[in-house]
Image (cartoon, helix red, strand yellow):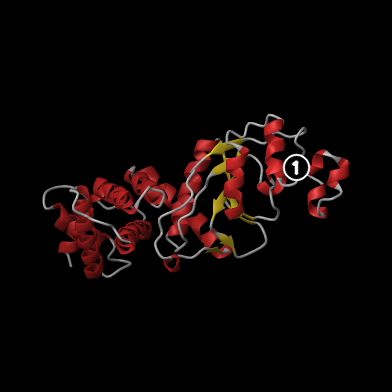
Amino acid sequence: MRCFHFPLLFWVPSTSETVKAGAFALRPRRWEVSIFDLYSLAAEGHPIRIPAELMHVFLPNVNLEISVDATDHEKAVTLLDTLRVMLYLDGLMPTIAPFATSHSLNEYAGINFRSSSQLAEKLPDGLRQGISAKGSRVEGWPGELNFSVICGDSDNFSRMLSATAFIRAEKNVLKWQEIEAQDVNAVTLRGALAKAALMPDRASSILHIWQSLEAVFGKGPELTFRMSLSLAELCGPIALRTETYSEAKKSYKVRSGITHGKGGIVNDESWLLAWRLLVKTIQSILHRNAIPSEDEIFLALLSR
C-alpha cells in the first residue's frame, strides 16, 4: 500500500491538525514550497512528471492536501474522486487536484535549503529536518491541469472543509463503494459529478450531467416526462416530488436547447439547476443504498 498526496485548490481546512479517516487523511498546508525546492527535485532527477514551473503556478492556491492510501495511482484517483463527490453533497465548492505526489508538500518544502548545512540554518525550526533532494525519491503524477472551475456565485458553495464533514464523507465513500459494486451505473453518476465542474463551459457541463442521468434513467419514449417523473420519485425521500419534477423538466429543456443549438448563452442559474439535480440524485441513492430500476420507481409511484 502506498500513500498518494493530492493538493486541492480553493478549499480551506477548519483545523490546523491532520485528520485521518479510513484510507484518507486531511493535511493542512504548513509551509511554502519555493520554485527552488521544485527545481531541486528536477535537477536530481526525481520522477515528478510535471514541470516545476507549472506546479508552482498551482501551489499558491493550495491550503490543504488529501492523502490517499492505495495500491497504485489510478486507484488513488478513483478514491479521491469518490471522496470529493461525497463532499460536494455536503455543499463544498468544486475543486481541482492538479497533481499528486508520493510525499506531502510539507515534506518537500525547504528541500532546496536543506541541501546545504549553511542554508538549512536559515529555515524555520520545523523545516530544518526532513527529506533531502539527494537522499529521497519524490514521485509525481499530473492530474487536472485546469485553472478554474464552473461554480457560479461562490455564495452557493462553501470553501471550508471541517473535520466533521471529512469524516462523514469517508463513511459515505464506503457506502457508495458498496453501491458501485452492485450497480455499474453508480460509477457513471459518480464520475459525472466529479468532473462536471471541470468542463470547458457551462453548456458542456450541463450536457455532461444529463448524459449521465439519461444513461441511468433515460429509457423509453416521452423522455422529458419519464425522466422528470423518475427523478421526482427517486428523490422523494429527501425532497419534494413536485419541486424535483419541475426542476428536472426545466433543466431538461435547457439541455435540449443546447443539444439542438438553440440554447443561447447558458447562465449560472441553469448550470446550478443541473448540478443540484445530480447532487440530489446521488444523495437519494445513498439514502436508498441502491439505484432502483425504472419499474421499481414507477411501482412505488403507483402504490401511493
Query: According to the image, label 1 marks what residue?
Result: 111
Q: Is residue 122 left or right of residue 176?
A: right
What x and y, as percent, mark residue 76? 53, 41
Mark 1 neighbour class, 10 Å CA radius: few under 14, some 14 to 19, many 20 or more: many
Q: In front: 27, or 7?
A: 7
Q: Is residue 139 left or right of residue 204?
A: right
Q: Is residue 98 left or right of residue 225?
A: right
Residue shown at the point (36%, 48%) measured from the top left? 192
Residue shown at the point (63%, 35%) measured from the top left? 139
Q: Amino acid at mark 1?
A: Ile
**Quarter occupied by the C terminus:** bottom left
Q: In front: 148, or 126?
A: 148
Which secondary structure, mark 1?
loop
Q: Is residue 290 left or right of residue 80?
A: left
Total marks drawn? 1
**Quarter occupied by the N terminus:** top right
Inspect this view and state whether residue 302 appears. yes
Q: Vertically, is 146 above or below 88?
A: above
Q: Residue furthest left?
A: 221
Inspect this view and state whether residue 3 appears. no
What x and y, as percent, mark residue 212? 30, 47
What x and y, as percent, mark residue 134? 77, 32
Residue shown at the point (84%, 50%) measured from the top left? 122
Residue 28: which quarter of the image? bottom right
Q: In front: 290, or 81?
A: 81
Q: In front: 201, or 283?
A: 201
What x and y, as percent, mark residue 110? 75, 46
